[in-house]
Image (cartoon, coloured by chain):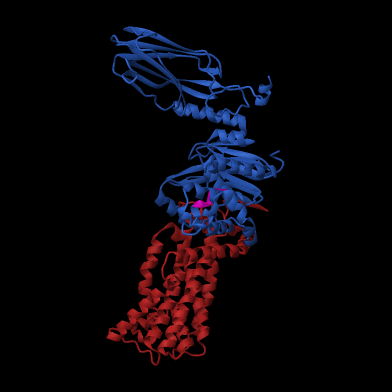
Amino acid sequence: MSSHDPVIEVERLSKRFSRNLRRSLFYGLQDIGKEVAGRGQYAETLRPSEFWALRDVSFDVGRGETVGLIGHNGAGKTTLLKLMNGLIKPTTGRIAIHGSVRALIALNAGFNPILTGRENVKVASAVLGMGEREIDRRLEEIVDFAELGDFIDTPVRSYSSGMAARLGFAIAVHTQPDILLVDEVLAVGDLNFAIKCYRKINEFRNNGGSIVLVSHNAYSIRSNCDRVVWIEHGIVQDIGLTEDVCDAYEAAVASQDAETPNEEYSDGSVLLTDVRHAEAIDTGAPFAVEVELHVTRPLDRPIVSVTISTVAGHPVVSNISPPGGEPRLEVGRNVVRVTYDELPLTRGIYGISVVVAEETINNQVFAALRRSEFEVRVPRGDLGAGVLQLTPSWSNADDLDRV
Amino acid sequence: MTRVYTPDSPVRRPRAFLRTIVTDARAVRTLAWRLFVRDIAAQYRQTAIGYLWAALPAVVSALVWVVLQRVGVLSVKTGSVPYIAYVLVGTMFWQLFLDALNAPLTQLNMNRSMLNRVSFPTEAIFVSGAAQVVFSFAIKLVVLAVVLAASGAPVKWTAPAALLPAFALLLLGTTIGIVLTPVGMLFQDVQQGMNAIVGPLMFLTPVIYSVDQAGVLGRYMRFNPLTPVFQVTRELLFGGVGPYVTELGIVAGVTVVLAFAGWFVYRLSLPIVIERIEA
């Protein structure tokens, strides 16, 4: 459905920026000169202190399609949005936009704190291109959507940041473009409001609107997009169906985090010589970890703890052996085995941390954080939100009553 | 409606360039009105004497010159026109010029956060800025009328026509302001430089004394494009200054040409400036 009727065509797009503020300002003068002289901004090389914020980016967005832009902070996503919005000029390449574009950004940054919410709505609506009559017609709708009640007639400076964001978003969502550019704003506001926003966006999509959704969060991309463009350091890493690209992105996120040095502490009495386990398992499968420890002195009522944690470092499963009980730790080589009958975790890369302590878990003689990692796989098509991957059965409660 | 963004300069395709300018200019009115209402409301809601602030600085500075004249530090001969009337016209028109000159850059800076987030006809910011200058000048005029009446100044029947040079002053100030915006948005030197220049510039302009009485300075004053504006204003109000109408015509003509040139350069510079400003 995309290539037949594209509303956005991006071809070999590049954009260079300078890291150095002073130079950037002087380049600004130079660029203004070129623009006025008719020479334009085209360039294939970098000037000193410059880097490619985007390099050779090509993709398109079809009518009615939702395309996700994913990548880490600083990957060039926001730059791409600004280029598509016509705010800044490309260095190479071309963007063609067929239809009206509106960037869905929280407009509260432009609010005047002294004026009331209602007055600010009128200004922001005009900035977004609404005419006088349209503003008057939509004003109540926007005010209702923002759920501010009587606050709408008090100065914006008395608003909480959440209220201001809600109002800013309510205005943006009520303009009616053909193409919507959404930049991770949906995290704004409480759950109730976030759901309302998603509904509004869905409504827009069902009416044939096209959306470019920017996020570094694979979950929001998975649940909203038809296709995904993955950008890193200004370069397109992958373009394709949401599932494929998000899988690749998440795997890369995990391996990148794995490169972070794992920390280890030892008072000399215990050394970790090896950690053995399967490299990857399917969710719900059994899993075993063997920890090989070298003990240099007799330990007083030793404790072993093994923790499985997410890439973000949140512990998911953590167990402590009873002090002085199984497993025993003798001077010399010990192999401790931890067996999980099943590990119903959601998809992702998990780390294994090992701690050895005497008597209480706080009295640690050895600790190794994220010493080793393994992957949990989940069947495709599953969203994989949350921490656990369980398969509940669904039924109606009143049917159960009848049984 | 299809929009294409490339590295090319719009100068290469003047017709398409003009078309987008005209399209945007049509959308300016609504937006400029909203910005104007917003800024005026915000500006005066936090003050006790409100709109009087529009006239007060010019009145105070006029009073300073009157005192200097009284104690004999200054000896400006204004014939039958009381000095307070003479100098208030000068300081108020001078304030009009300063307001118009500063408005484009000040207004753009105030709206920075919108500039690099939303694509909209930013000319509305200039129009709103000019409207605010006019609004504040209108308040000054009321004060001026009261002072003229109270001081018994011999006002000619041509006085209402002094609005024409006032308009020329607004246009000239705004134009210079717009011409300076592209570089001014990048380098703060422009704003600092402007602040440094306007002080001395006032003494090369017939604000507190006339060209004839400025001695050596008078020679240089003739080359100041602001001079004919002030001369014609006083001629229309009180007479006895002599015609500077030709000079005013030339200044106005050059200003109009410069205004369009400044506008086009501003349009071309905006995307380059936007990528360099923080929200």
Residue at point 52%, 18% (across, down): A343
Q: Position of residue A33 (x, y in %)?
A: 49, 58
Q: Quadrant of residue A309?
A: top left
**Does residue B232 sit above or below A151 in this rendering?**
below
| Chain letter tied to blue | A
Residue extent of the magenta highlight: A104-108
**Does residue B167 sit above or below A398 in this rendering?**
below
> Which residue lies most toward the front here?
A402
Q: Position of residue A79 (x, y in %)?
A: 52, 45
Q: Is A119 left, or right, of B46 in this rendering?
A: right
| Chain letter tied to red | B
Q: Is B22 left, or right, of B242 in this rendering?
A: right
Q: Position of residue A121 (x, y in %)?
A: 56, 56
Residue sitting nearer the eye, B109 or A89: B109
Q: Is B174 left, or right, of A138 in this rendering?
A: left
Q: Position of residue A367 (x, y in %)?
A: 35, 20
Residue sitting nearer the eye, A184 or B229: A184
